[in-house]
Image (cartoon, rainbow, N blue to C red):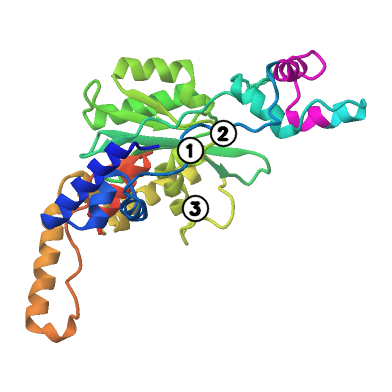
Amino acid sequence: MTGLAARNRIVLLVDEAVQSGARQRQACEVIGMSERTLQRWRENPEGDRRPSRVQEPSNKLDDLEQQRVLNIANSPEFGHLPPAQIVPRLLDQGEYIASQSSFYRVLRKAGQTRHRCASKPAERRKPQPLVATRPNQIYSWDITYLPTTIRGVYLFLYLFLDIYSRKIVGWQVYEEECSELAAEVIADVCAREKVLPNQVVLHSDNGGPMKGATMVATLQKLGVIPSLSRPAVSNDNPYSESLFRTMKYRSEYPHRPFDDLIHARAWVAKFVYWYNEEHRHSAIRYVTPSQRHAGLDIAILAHRHDVQTAARQRRPDRWSGPTRNWTPAGAVHLNPTKSTTTQAQCRAA
């Protein structure tokens, strides 16, 4: 409880702030208190009449009873069970020690409310937030299945994406899924994009090819920094998942399975050309990924703004609000925190 002297001091400071032009509500928010508390303090200048001592229930378990609860909760018979299971079993044995909530209260006081079993689940932390401000900073890659005419037999599409420009910087279709083939593709990507050591972060999920010894050794040799998603969490690798959905929901996607490897590679090559060179991507202000990757989007978007501004000047009656926003898309975040997402949304608005 806040002492009387401290309360009077706080009330005085708030009054001074209000007299200087500040609003009382904002002044209270700055010091972390509500206006209702301030009102109560002013109505009772002599201070809070509630007793300052901490009340304890008269039926509280004494030290001996609390120790008995701990002994039972840690016994070989009940050590692997939660209080919700312990209390009913004790009642079946004709014995009542304490309520379920009392068991939890005693265990919490002793610091034993954490997972007590040997099969404690491993903690999975979210990948480190990353941000790309230009091309060739963060790549995302994954493998997806392509069905064949033979039931149960699939081809595998390896696809590497630059998350800043959304350009597909590398791809290949193989008949098997392994880290050796993935290493070949990323080595080719780094050579064509002239990637320097420690320039690119390569993000992926936790699949076998992503963590294979050959792939890891190749990344170390190229100076590419690996980044992995949490196991079984597809949202940690959203850009690759979104790209695969775009590919498989295309009207041109074959309704029948692929005949062979040549057929699959030919179709993927056409899709990659369309996606990189013709597709106006909504996340980058409807320019093509290749245009943004080459830095041409700035001039293109400026031209769109000029054309639209001129049209508004000719016919202002057709606009009831501002013209469409054609400023270049900003930085791209991978696995951002909530605060980063909120800030990005505020800037976009």
Q: Is residue 210 left or right of residue 67?
A: left
3D distance between C-alphas at marks 2 and 3: 65 Å
Q: Does the magenta segment cover residue 229?
A: no
Q: Quadrant of the C terminus?
A: bottom left
Please state which amino acid type lies under the numbered disc 1: Pro
The residue beneath circle 2 is 55
Front residue (pair 33, 78): 33
The residue beneath circle 3 is 248
Q: Quadrant of the N terminus?
A: top left
Q: Main secondary structure of the magenta part?
A: helix
The mark nearer the N terminus, 3 or 1, is 1
Please state which amino acid type lies under the numbered disc 2: Gln
Which of the 4 image quarters holds residue 301?
Answer: bottom left
Q: Secondary structure at mark 2?
A: loop
**Looking at the picture, how far across and down is residue 124, in whole percent?**
51, 28
Question: Which region is colored magenta?
Answer: 64-87
3D distance between C-alphas at marks 1 and 2: 9 Å
Labels 2 and 3 touching (C-beta < 8 A): no
**Looking at the picture, how far across and down is residue 248, in whole percent?**
49, 53
Labels 3 and 1 touching (C-beta < 8 A): no
**Looking at the picture, how far across and down is residue 231, in whole percent?**
54, 31
Q: Secondary structure at mark 3?
A: helix
The reply to whether residue 284 is in sight is no
The residue beneath circle 1 is 51
Image position of 86 with respect to 274: above or below: above
The reply to whether residue 206 is in sight is yes
Q: Does the magenta segment cover residue 78?
A: yes
Image position of 267 with respect to 116: above or below: below
Please state which amino acid type lies under the numbered disc 3: Lys
